[in-house]
Amino acid sequence: MQTLFIGHTYIDVTFLTDRMPTGDEKLVAKDYAVSFGGNAVTAAFCCAKLGIKPDLITPVADDWLGRMFLDMAARYGVSLHARKVGKSSLSVVMPNNGRRAILRGRDDEYPHPFPVLNLSGCRALHLDGHQADAAIHYAKLFRKAGILTSIDGGGLRSNTDELLGYIDVAVVAERLCEQMNLEPPVMLDYLKSRGCRIGGVTLGARGMLWYDESGTVRTLPPLAIPSGLIVDTSGAGDVFHGAYIYSYLADSKKLWNEHFHFARAASTHKIQHLGNEAGLPTLQDIGIVTKRFEASI
């Protein structure tokens, strides 16, 4: 095992449409995609696509969507440690003008404890806050062992404050700032106070505000991609997380500014494609995006 991801699985159905039908109306979408979904789950698949096959603790149901997910994990070489749930979770995603609407159905009632794994050789942990019991258990183990811990703080959860006390790299969404009534610069101060060595707030089309190894606050502007190339922003943040974990594992001696530049190119590739799977980049894709768009910043 090189890296462990812990999160919640969705099957995403993404429709490209100008509007949603109402009443007794039927419409045909311009395009659609069916893929794996979930914050840490998509990040894990991104890491696998880039060349480092992760382990993943995530809920899987014994139904046709669950079996579809098992096939997806096998195809990407993701080592799956399934936690049983009664039925699969589903997301309907509708991208629209650089934003996206999401409707979800979720089963997060776990009848059994989380899997206990042998962590020998593992070099990083990435969480999205789901499976709170598993998240805090492994965050404590990794912190005690001095192994990198990372979190995608997409929203406020029951144990967010406690969990952040065991996190080295915390990249949170602007939504968390809103839920905690903190402006992004104040959120960075909060992350510092919880002991996070690297902290950032993703701001969508405005890039990211973050602080580096020295505590210096910096900005990471978005790449200058024409709006006409943007197809689907859903999953871009998840790809960002998966890519910086890969970059860290590939060369942990690099500064986090370099890891985040790599991840920015990965997420820029994602938004040009419909659905999570189609948007997963290869190393070649990241090189192309970097060469095409970074020079115009």
Image: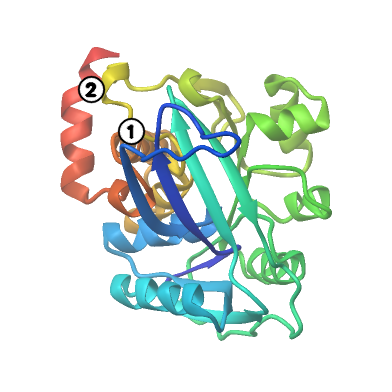
Number of numbered discs overlaid on the protein picture: 2
122 sits left or right of 106 in the view: left
In the rendered image, residue 225, in percent from the top left (x then y), is placed at 29, 20
When the figure is inspected, residue 44 is found, relative to residue 189, above or below; the finding is below
Question: Looking at the rendering, which quadrant does residue 178 occupy?
Answer: top right
Q: Circle 2 is placed at which residue position?
A: 293
In the rendered image, residue 207, in percent from the top left (x then y), is placed at 47, 23
Gap between marks 2 and 1 measured at Cα: 9 Å
Question: For the residue labelled by badge 1, is the local secondary structure a helix, a strand or a loop?
Answer: helix
In the rendered image, residue 151, in percent from the top left (x then y), is placed at 61, 51
Q: Nearer the viewer, residue 289 or 197?
A: 289
Residues at badges 2 and 1 in contact (C-beta under 8 Å)? yes
When the figure is inspected, residue 273 is found, relative to residue 98, above or below; the finding is below
When the figure is inspected, residue 57 is found, relative to residue 264, above or below; the finding is below
Q: Circle 1 is placed at which residue position?
A: 268
> Disc 1 residue type?
Thr
Mark 1: few, some, or many residues within 10 Å (few <14, many ≥20)? many
Mark 2: few, some, or many residues within 10 Å (few <14, many ≥20)? some
Question: Looking at the rendering, which quadrant does residue 115 occupy?
Answer: bottom right
> Disc 2 residue type?
Phe
Q: Which residue is drawn at 59% across and 84% down?
A: 117
Q: Residue at x 37, y 44 (%)?
A: 254
In the rendered image, residue 17, in percent from the top left (x then y), is placed at 40, 33
Chain-order first, disc 2 or disc 1: 1
Q: Which of 164 and 76 is in front in this view?
A: 76
